[in-house]
Amino acid sequence: MARHTADIVIIGAGIMGLSIAHQITRRSDLRVVVLEKGAGLGEGSTGGSAAITRQRYSRPENIRVSRDANRVFAAWAEFTGLVTPRAEYHRSGVLWMMGQSDEEVRADTARLRAEGVDAVMIDAAELRERFPALSPCYEPFDLTGEEPHECRDGEAFLLELDSGYFDATAALEDLAEAVRGAGADLRIRTAVTDVVTEGARVRGVVTSTGSRIDAGTVINAAGPWCNTINRMAGLELTWQLVPTRVQIVYRDLPPEVPRPIPVVGDASTGIYFRPESAGQQLIMGSVLEEDELEEADPDTYNRAADRAFIDTKIHALHHRIPGLPHRGMPRGMAGMYTINRQDVHPIIGPTPVEGFVVANGFSGHGFKESPMVGSMVAQWLTGERASFDTDVPMSFYSIDREPLVTADKNVLA
Ligand SMILES: Cc1cc2nc3c(=O)[nH]c(=O)nc-3n(C[C@H](O)[C@H](O)[C@H](O)COP(=O)(O)OP(=O)(O)OC[C@H]3O[C@@H](n4cnc5c(N)ncnc54)[C@H](O)[C@@H]3O)c2cc1C
């Protein structure tokens, strides 16, 4: 068996693996190898990600992580060091239509502003002015179509002005270019088939190409495959990390629908949506726990969306955008993310297997958190700080923590 050495092996070239590699290489000369089993980039969670960068979370630390990441996305060329990066940040704003009272939205807005988020409260008149396509209705809407519905304007809405969405696949390509440019060895079509340990210490990995890579640090950034890698390392976790199938619907957005359309979180029907494809389409997903479908095997899940899911969510979308023509066939797809069942937040950092590090269980938060995950792990491994770093310590997500207490125990957490 061919034998190589590295300082750090990262398993998985999703947004976490590449972000961690990027941040290590920009602040050290450590020899980093990133191993990706896919035939290309984006075959895991990241490839299907809506990449929304909202900042409204119930915990201040999560707000700050998103806030700091939004600053990175807005300065992507400088951050990656690429002259013409492929990924583009769309600062569309994120509008929350959560059925809250005026008082509740005011308190929520103040909470976000205290953490440095540019959040404002708007009423129905301002909502119509800013986003003429959107209905300000707050009445719960029956998706079966059986209950009669009369729209009634909500009192107040929260708008994050400095949030939006990114392009997940293009971000992977940018980071791949950046890490390769910085000297990291990124190998595609190379699966880790074993993690080598000696006693309670990691020694390296074995790959599907028949080689062994010796390394003192091995990082599990394998997304929904994380449990397989943890088992290879002999790591037993009390955290329950569950690969979960989630669906997305695409709907054409013809020119007669007035722009702009922000990212919208809509509690009346449990959907979120945002513009896609240079504003020619909308993509929509669900924020409901019942739509998070546990799946055992990230290699064999059904990647098509269920017809029933598409049909129901389309009703919800037309309720929020009444002028959206009922034209053409909406399409869908399914992706997969990993939910930490105990508190819906990731585990990041060292483990009892010395040298074996995890960055797992990101649920629907991972894309926006990724630059700061890279920052935390790289800061801890190299001892070097960088200008874009977050002040939230990696220990906030440590595997030794108590489950975080959050307002919701779903993707909104
Ligand atoms: C439909 C959908 C919508 C989402 N929307 C949002 C959103 O709006 N905002 C947001 O912040 N987040 C969102 N997310 C969540 C976010 O995309 C994920 O949390 C994030 O992409 C996780 O990245 P990752 O690198 O951990 O995992 P992945 O992208 O899955 O990367 C893991 C990689 O590891 C590789 N791998 C696995 N096993 C091995 C092995 N043995 N050897 C080598 N390589 C291996 C896989 O091939 C994969 O490429 C969404 C996710 C989905 C599915």
Image (cartoon, helix red, strand yellow):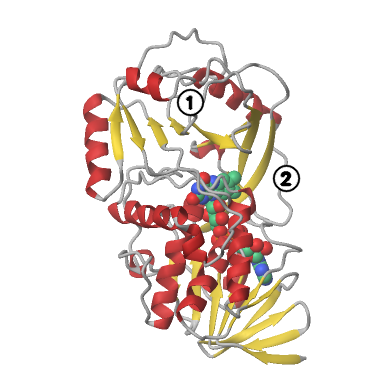
Pointer 2 residue: 302
The amino acid sitting under disc 2 is: Asn
What mark, if any, has residue 39 been given in the picture? none
Name the residue located 49 percent from the left edge and 29 percent from the top edge.
260
Residue 296, how many percent across, how many down?
Answer: 65, 54
Question: Would you say 69 lies left or right of 245 here?
Answer: left
- Ligand 1: which quarter? bottom right
Crowding at mark 2 (Cα within 10 Å: few <14, some 14-19, many 20+): some
Name the residue located 35 percent from the left edge and 58 percent from the top edge.
403
Q: Which of 372 and 140 is in front in this view?
A: 372
Q: Earlier in the sequence, mark 1 or mark 2?
A: 1
**Separation of residues labelled 1 and 2 (CA atoms):** 25 Å
Q: What element carries label 1?
A: loop
* Figure check: 183 above or below 122: below
Name the residue located 50 percent from the left edge and 43 percent from the top edge.
90
Q: Quadrant of the N terminus?
A: bottom right
* Figure check: 22 above or below 169: below
Crowding at mark 1 (Cα within 10 Å: few <14, some 14-19, many 20+): many
Residue 223 visible from this viewpoint: no
Q: Which residue lies furthest to the front in this view?
A: 83
Question: Would you say 100 lies left or right of 374 here?
Answer: left
Q: Are marks 1 and 2 in contact (CB under 8 Å)?
A: no
Residue 171, how many percent across, how many down?
Answer: 58, 57
Residue 81, how many percent across, how many down?
Answer: 52, 67
Residue 336 visible from this viewpoint: yes
The amino acid sitting under disc 1 is: Thr
Q: Is mark 2 on a helix, strand or loop?
A: loop
Name the residue located 58 percent from the left edge and 20 percent from the top edge.
315
* Figure check: 269 above or below 94: above
Q: Nearer the viewer, residue 277 or 342?
A: 277
The picture quadrant where one finds residue 172 is bottom right
Pointer 1 residue: 269
